[in-house]
Image: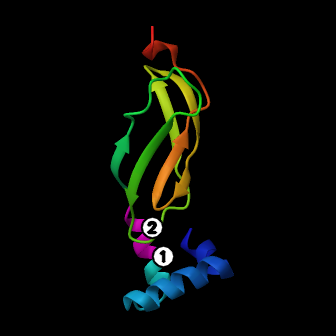
Amino acid sequence: MLKSVMLNPELKALYSAEAKRRGVINAYNMALSDCLRLPEIKAIDVANYTGSTLGEVITIEVSDNFKVVQMKVTILHGERTVEEGNAILIADIWQYATTALNPTLFR
């Protein structure tokens, strides 16, 4: 994976800039550090999620040593997937707007 990152000019430039900003030796070391440390979910706010209306917003706060480029949300009921999709990043908070009803929550 690191080899493919270093062969991608856009990613290499991002890692190079971040390495320079942090005083890290080079882009490869910055990318290696990023790969070795998984993002950490700090908080998930489901206070506004009732499952009874489409478009309810769930927010997720995540920290990472570089940056998170995608956040996939999956809502489960037991073993069954109620819905899943990608959250969007707004003002450093990932937000997911629901696309399916979850009748198991509002019976």
Task: Locate the N terminus and report the quarter of the image it occupies.
Answer: bottom right
Name the image quarter holding residue 23. Answer: bottom left
The foreground one among 52 and 66 is: 52
Measured as percent of width and height from the top left, residue 10 is found at 66, 79
Amino acid carrying label 2: it is Cys
**Which residue is at a point 53% across and 43% down the rendered structure image?**
96
Measured as percent of width and height from the top left, residue 77 is found at 45, 21
Estimate how packed mark 2 is, as few (under 14), some (14 to 19) or many (20 or more) residues with alpha carbons within 10 Å: some
Q: How many marks?
A: 2
Query: Is 4 drawn above or below residue 83 in the view shown?
Result: below
Q: Which mark is residue 31?
A: 1
Q: State the separation of the CA atoms marked 2 and 1.
A: 6 Å
Q: What's the magenta region?
A: 32-39
Residue at the top extreme, as displayed? 107
Q: Which structural element holds mark 2?
A: helix
The foreground one among 81 and 91 is: 91
User: In the image, 33: left or right of 80?
Assistant: left
**Which residue is at a point 38% across and 70% down the rendered structure image?**
65
Task: Locate the C terminus and report the quarter of the image it occupies.
Answer: top left
Identify the residue position indicated by label 2 in the image: 35
Determine contact: label 2, label 1, CB under 8 Å: yes
Measured as percent of width and height from the top left, residue 40 is found at 35, 56
Q: Which mark is residue 73?
A: none
Query: Is 90 drawn above or below residue 82 in the view shown?
Result: below
Estimate how packed mark 1 is, as few (under 14), some (14 to 19) or many (20 or more) residues with alpha carbons within 10 Å: many
Amino acid carrying label 1: it is Ala
User: In the image, 55: left or right of 41?
Assistant: right
Q: Which structural element holds mark 1?
A: helix
Name the image quarter holding residue 69. Answer: bottom right
